[in-house]
Amino acid sequence: MDPKKRTKLPVAAAQSSKLRVKTETQPSSVSVSATKESKKPFLRKRSMSMTEFSVSSKSKTAFKRPAPVPMNKIVTSQKPKKPKIPDWDYKSRFQNLQGIHTKLVEDSKKSQERLNDLENIEEQYLKLKGDFQTVETERNAFKVQLNETSSKLERLENIESKYQSVTKELVHITDENRTLKIKNDELNSTLQQLYLERDTLKKSNEQLGSLLEKNEVVRRKLHNNVQDLKGNIRVFCRIRPAINEQENVKEKCYLKLQEDSSLEIAKSNAVNNKQVFTFNTVFHEGSTQLECFEELAQLVQSALDGYHVCVFAYGQTGSGKTYTMQGLDTPNDIGMIPRTVNLIFDSIENLKCSNWTYEVRVSFLEIYNETVRDLLTTTLQNLDICFNEGKGTTVNNLQIKQIFSYDDFEHYLKIAQKNRMVAATDFNEHSSRSHAITKIYLIGKNQSGEYYAGSINLVDLAGSESAKTSHGERLVETKAINKSLSNLGKVMLSLCNKEKHIPYRNSKLTYLLQSCLGGNSKTLMIVNISPFEENYGESINSLRFASMVKEVKTKSKKVRALAPIECNN
Ligand SMILES: Nc1ncnc2c1ncn2[C@@H]1O[C@H](COP(=O)(O)OP(=O)(O)OP(=O)(O)O)[C@@H](O)[C@H]1O
């Protein structure tokens, strides 16, 4: 058949250039197969994973796969061979070809439909791919959101667990708070009661305070009346014991006490020739420091009441003056000076409830070879003594230190002791060669505005000894000591005889103690004697001197402080 005369095939058939018709070897059977191009979309479709099509149920429903066209409908299967049409039977051959043609046209139509279907499938695939990508993007976005949400959830869970524990704590705290509130209310009511009690006590305390203040004034008056009756110059005698083996074997003179106030004394070999001395008190060899202090303690109270008090330790070298005044560190051996300071601070503490407050000051000086020296400094000086009508005798440039406790006092006492001149003598290894004066100033005031300025002079006199036994530098010292002690005796004698002129200025010692000796002071002299036969002469001298002092009558009065004493610490 001439291809030019062949009936024109419809469009679907025309596109069958993509199809091949095999007629040469088996004209009765037609084999149709997809060309390379027509296979492509199909192949592409087949290479697509099924998972891509099953992303979402939505896309599953959107895409309906067309029912596959069985290949036997495209490729004609071999049929039983028909009887061969002879070459000359053009009609039959024509009819046969027409049949084939019709069949091919039908097949072509089907193929065309199938092709259209395939094209639709590709479109749908592309659409689905787009949808899929959108879904994928959405899925990723969701994934990110999911992650964020999960971490948020985690945080929320943490917060929730924290919230729960905080809630628990809150409940606990609330409970505690409730309990505390109850307790607080109870305490508040107790406090209110206590406030009321306090106010009542305050009132009664004020009443008692003013009563105490009045009583204190009365007590002071009575105390000082008693002291006045006892005499403003009191003399005690103290006999010291033998203190070591060497002294134990020493011969002692005859010494006998009568009623604690009289002392009989005689040489051991002349007992009938005894002399009797009477003093306020005589302390025997076994008397304690505490017993000696009892009398002085009453004068400490007078000093706090605004009186001037002066305590002397008089006696020959080695008779026990320093032991009496300073004592030793062991509790039973503590001397008059430390006991006085301790008593002052104890009394000040007790007087606080009577509305009295005190300032305590202290100075230390020595008179050595008629020069006055401040014991709180190491520099050698000769300080001037002045006499002022209002203030009495004062020492220029003497350091006066304020003290607040016994420890403060001890601090300065140690400095003073170190600076005190001590030289060895034949009688006493550490014999003091100077007069040492510790002065305590007491300035008291009460709420009513009353001011008192009392003082206590504690004097450890240098030992009296015969000039015959001293040599060189010691002889100069002894002469100076004896001069001042004999001047002390002269002053006392003048006072005793009520003479008009009292020779205070003849020595530094009497000049400095002028107001204590003759005037406005309560004086206590402790005359120390040694019990030994060898000291009999010096003991008699000391006892005579003390007897003379005992006869002196003075009138003391308390001092209202005009201006506080200057303190240079
Ligand atoms: N009552 C006493 N009890 C015990 N020991 C005492 C007593 N009196 C004095 N002594 C001791 O006797 C010695 C001499 O006494 P102390 O040094 O006090 O004499 P003094 O009079 O101060 O001498 P001086 O004038 O030379 O300074 C010291 O060792 C002292 O401890």
Image (cartoon, rainbow, N blue to C red):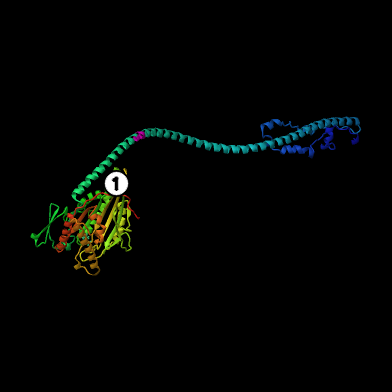
Q: Is residue 334 in view?
A: no
Left or right: 97 as drawn, with respect to 185? right
Q: Residues within 10 Å of mark 1 (few under 14, many from 20)?
A: some
Left or right: 34 as drawn, with respect to 477? right
Identify the residue position indicated by label 1 in the image. Answer: 349
Give percent across and percent down for residue 62.
71, 31
Q: Report the residue that reaches farthest toward the left.
A: 272
Classify the position of the N terminus by image quarter: top right
Say what amino acid the circle numbered 1 marks.
Glu
Q: Which residues are magenta?
A: 190-195
* Helix, strand or loop for the magenta stretch, by majority: helix
Residue 558 higher or lower than 26, as above or below: below
Please tell me which residue is depicted at 76% across the width and 37% down the height of the picture. Answer: 41
Q: Quadrant of residue 411?
A: bottom left
Residue 139 higher or lower than 549, as above or below: above
Classify the position of the C terminus by image quarter: bottom left
Q: Report the residue that reaches farthest toward the front.
A: 500
Q: Quadrant of residue 400?
A: bottom left
Q: How many marks?
A: 1
Ligand 1's quadrant is: bottom left
User: Front-most of 215 and 242?
Assistant: 215
Give percent across and percent down for residue 488.
21, 59
Q: Is residue 139 in view?
A: yes
